[in-house]
Image (cartoon, rainbow, N blue to C red):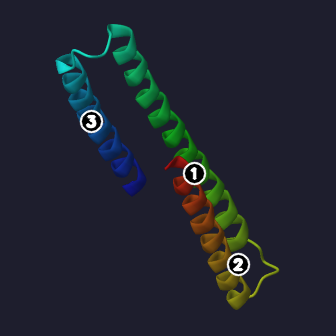
């Protein structure tokens, strides 16, 4: 699946970024060991929260799109319109999430 490949790529990139962070923190003499560990823990927590939210959003989208696609009470045009609205709502939600994260 393409989603699995993307997730693997994000995980590999995450590992690479964490290695860079650890190397930079190891070279930093101004921070204590505890402060360095807190920074690493914070970035790990952020990653896990973001990953969890991405998975949750994907599952919700799959369920919603399946419900729309399988609704026999909708015409083809109504389905297209409902799918379009769902995509727009997801865009707004994603934009709000990223703006909140900044």
Horizontal relation, residue 4 to residue 54: left or right: left
x%, y% of residue 101? 52, 48
Query: Is 99 positioned to the left or the right of 63 in the image?
Result: left
Is the C-beta separation of discs 1 and 2 under 8 Å?
no
Q: Where is residue 7 in the image (x, y as percent from the top left)?
A: 38, 45
Please report whichever mark, 2 or 3, sits nearer to the chain's N-terminal start. Answer: 3
In the rendered image, the vertical position of residue 92 relative to residue 6, given as above or below: below
Residue 17, horizontal then vertical, whole percent: 26, 36
Q: Which residue is drawn at 20% across and 26% down?
A: 24
Label 2 vs label 3: CA separation?
Answer: 39 Å
Image quarter (top left, top right, bottom left or bottom right) of the N terminus: bottom left
Q: Is mark 2 on a helix, strand or loop?
A: helix
Which residue, given by chain and number where applicable, does mark 3 sit on?
17
Judge left or right: residue 37 versus residue 100.
left
**Residue ID at (68%, 88%):** 76
Of label 1 and label 2, which has the lower sequence position? 2
The relative height of residue 10 versus residue 74 in the rendered view (above or below) is above
**Whole-number angstrom distance, CA of label 3 to CA of label 1:** 22 Å
Quadrant in which residue 15 is drawn: top left
Q: Mark 2 points at which residue?
A: 82
Residue 74 versus residue 44 in the image, above or below: below
- Discs 2/3, front: 3
Labelled disc at residue 100: 1
């Amino acid at each position: 699946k393409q989603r699995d490949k993307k997730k693997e790529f994000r995980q590999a990139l995450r590992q690479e970024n964490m290695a860079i962070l650890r190397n930079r923190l190891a070279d930093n003499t101004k921070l204590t060991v505890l402060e360095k560990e807190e920074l690493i823990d914070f970035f790990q927590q952020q990653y896990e929260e973001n990953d969890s939210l991405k998975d949750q959003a994907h599952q919700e989208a799959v369920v919603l799109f399946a419900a729309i696609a399988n609704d026999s009470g909708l015409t083809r045009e109504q389905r297209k319109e409902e799918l379009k609205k769902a995509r727009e709502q997801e865009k707004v939600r994603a934009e709000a999430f990223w703006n909140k994260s900044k």
